[in-house]
Image: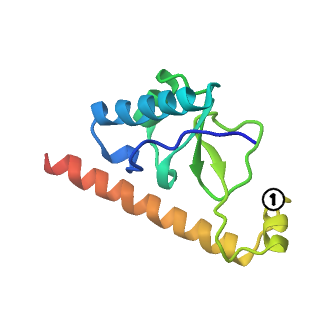
């Protein structure tokens, strides 16, 4: 079992200021390490959202890797700061979980991948519109 960080207040890390981003990632790691008396090597980005700045800040904070949500199985060549993870719902059965982990495509996994891609498009569009309005 591994305990990893997930931020302090669970914000969308790619949508906050650089100062708050540093606070979220550094403080989360420090608090956990203090309470556990052991290193906390990884971070799972809240909602799976990250960008280059988030990943670089995680690296600078001393994390060895970060998990994003892409609803894919991790591969050996994955970026260590964008390792994909699967969404497991409370309705996910053990058989469905086993199938997903074994790399089989399930209906839930197909839906989750579509939703993940859709949110990515919306977030990129929102970021472009926001930056062009400034």
Q: Quadrant of the C terminus?
A: top left
Q: Nearer the viewer, residue 53 or 21?
A: 21
Q: How many marks?
A: 1
The residue shown at (65%, 40%) is 3
In this view, the residue farthest toward the left is 134
Quadrant of residue 125 within the rendered picture: bottom left
The reply, left or right, for residue 100 in relation to residue 39 is right
Q: Is residue 2 above or below residue 71?
A: above
Q: Nearer the viewer, residue 85 or 116?
A: 85
Q: Is residue 107 above or below residue 39?
A: below
Dot 1: few (<14), some (14–19), or many (≥20) neighbours within 10 Å?
Answer: some
The reply, left or right, for residue 30 in relation to residue 86 is left
Quadrant of residue 110 within the rendered picture: bottom right
The reply, left or right, for residue 45 in relation to residue 76 is left
The residue shown at (78%, 64%) is 100
- Give the labeled residue for mark 1: 101
Query: Regarding mark 1 in the picture, which secondary structure is present there?
Result: helix
Q: Is residue 30 above or below residue 87?
A: above
The residue shown at (46%, 35%) is 28
The residue shown at (43%, 61%) is 121
Q: Please state the horizontal and vertical placement of residue 46, each as a whole percent of the image.
A: 48, 50
Which color scheme did the rendering employ for the protein?
rainbow
Q: Please state the horizontal and vertical placement of residue 1, each as a whole percent of the image.
A: 76, 42
The reply, left or right, for residue 95 in relation to residue 91 is right
Q: Please state the horizontal and vertical placement of residue 19, each as a whole percent of the image.
A: 28, 30
């Amino acid at each position: 079992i591994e305990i990893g960080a997930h931020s302090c207040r669970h914000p969308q890390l790619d949508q906050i200021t650089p100062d708050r981003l540093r606070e979220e990632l550094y403080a989360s790691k420090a608090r956990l390490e203090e309470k556990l008396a052991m290193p906390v090597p990884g971070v799972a980005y809240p909602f799976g959202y990250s960008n280059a700045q988030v990943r670089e800040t995680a690296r600078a904070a001393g994390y060895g890797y970060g998990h994003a949500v892409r609803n894919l199985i991790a591969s050996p060549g994955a970026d260590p700061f964008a390792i994909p993870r699967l969404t497991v719902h409370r309705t996910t059965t053990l058989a469905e979980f086993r199938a997903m982990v074994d790399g089989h495509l399930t209906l839930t996994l197909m839906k989750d991948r579509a939703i993940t891609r859709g949110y990515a498009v919306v977030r990129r569009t929102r970021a472009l519109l926001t930056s062009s309005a400034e």
